[in-house]
Image: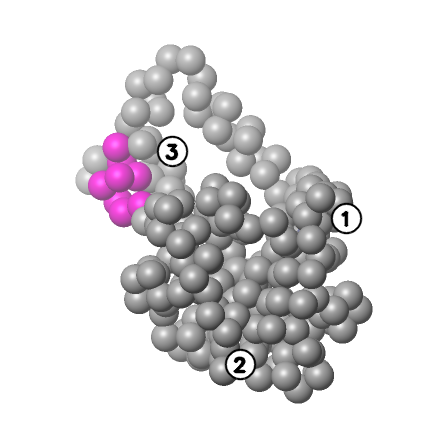
């Protein structure tokens, strides 16, 4: 016996595929959309339908962008000499909220994780190395989360930078960051402190 019409079940299943949304939350969302009278489901549907249409990756930092270069890379008030390497676009937003950094970013779109079959070539490491060769910075701040995979990725990155002859100072965020914690869960104060107290990778 089917408890719910097909369209509702399909919507619940689709939403529960999202990270952090279980079946119960998905049910709650779908039922509230069904009750909603101002056409929120259409608004959401349209927004999601067009989500990937005009989005590309910045040719410099790999952050999401609408043009060849993102607004941060285009901003001439920001220094090219400091590059802050982060795991995801969400971390750029978290770092920007701290106002503690006036350089530019590099978004890896992941960390190396053998268990999830993510290898170095699956994330934007090569783009970073090419970028560093083209426009050598004076400091590279590796701002990755405190997970084991991120740790391994940081070490790999520092080693790769050394191998291409990069002479920039390579530093890491201070460990005010809880291990296993994502940057975007940190409050701006903790994150900006971690940025200010960063230390060189030896
Ligand atoms: Zn950019």
Q: What segment carries the magenta color?
A: 21-28
Assign the magenta stretch its main secondary structure.
helix
Distance of label 3 from label 1 (alpha carbons): 39 Å
* Relative height, residue 161 to residue 20 (above, below): below
Q: Residues within 10 Å of mark 3 (few under 14, many from 20)?
A: few
Q: Nearer the viewer, residue 122 or 74?
A: 74
In the image, taking residue 19 as reference, residue 168 lies left or right, namely right
Question: Which residue bears the numbered disc 3?
Answer: 7
Which residue sits furthest bottom?
163
Secondary structure at badge 1 equals loop
- x, y (%) of residue 159? 57, 84
Q: Residues within 10 Å of mark 1 (few under 14, many from 20)?
A: some
In the image, taking residue 84 as reference, residue 175 lies left or right, namely left
Question: Which residue bears the numbered disc 2?
Answer: 156
Q: Quadrant of residue 121?
A: bottom right
Q: Residues within 10 Å of mark 2 (few under 14, many from 20)?
A: some
Which residue sits furthest front?
197
Secondary structure at badge 2 equals helix
Q: Give the residue at x 69% y 53%.
A: 79
Q: Is residue 55 visible?
A: yes
Question: Which residue bears the numbered disc 1?
Answer: 68
- Which callout, 3 or 1, points at the residue further toward the start of the chain? 3
Q: Is residue 25 magenta?
A: yes
């Amino acid at each position: 016996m089917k408890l719910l019409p097909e369209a509702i079940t399909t919507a619940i299943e689709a939403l529960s595929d999202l990270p952090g949304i279980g079946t119960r939350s998905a049910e709650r969302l779908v039922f509230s959309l069904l009750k909603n009278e101002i056409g929120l489901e259409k608004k959401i549907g349209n927004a999601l339908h067009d989500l990937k249409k005009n989005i590309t990756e910045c040719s410099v930092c790999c952050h999401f962008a609408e043009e060849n270069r993102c607004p941060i890379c285009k901003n001439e008030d920001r220094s090219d000499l400091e590059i802050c390497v982060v795991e995801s676009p969400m971390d750029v937003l978290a770092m920007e909220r701290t106002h503690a950094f006036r350089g530019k970013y590099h978004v890896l779109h992941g960390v190396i994780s053998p268990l999830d079959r993510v290898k170095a070539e699956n994330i934007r490491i090569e783009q970073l190395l090419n970028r560093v060769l083209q426009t050598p910075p004076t400091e590279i701040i590796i701002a990755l989360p405190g997970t084991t995979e991120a740790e391994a990725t940081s070490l790999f990155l520092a080693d790769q930078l050394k191998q291409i002859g990069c002479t920039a100072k390579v530093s890491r965020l201070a460990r005010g960051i809880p291990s296993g914690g994502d940057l975007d869960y940190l409050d701006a104060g903790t994150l900006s402190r971690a940025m200010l107290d960063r230390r060189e990778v030896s």
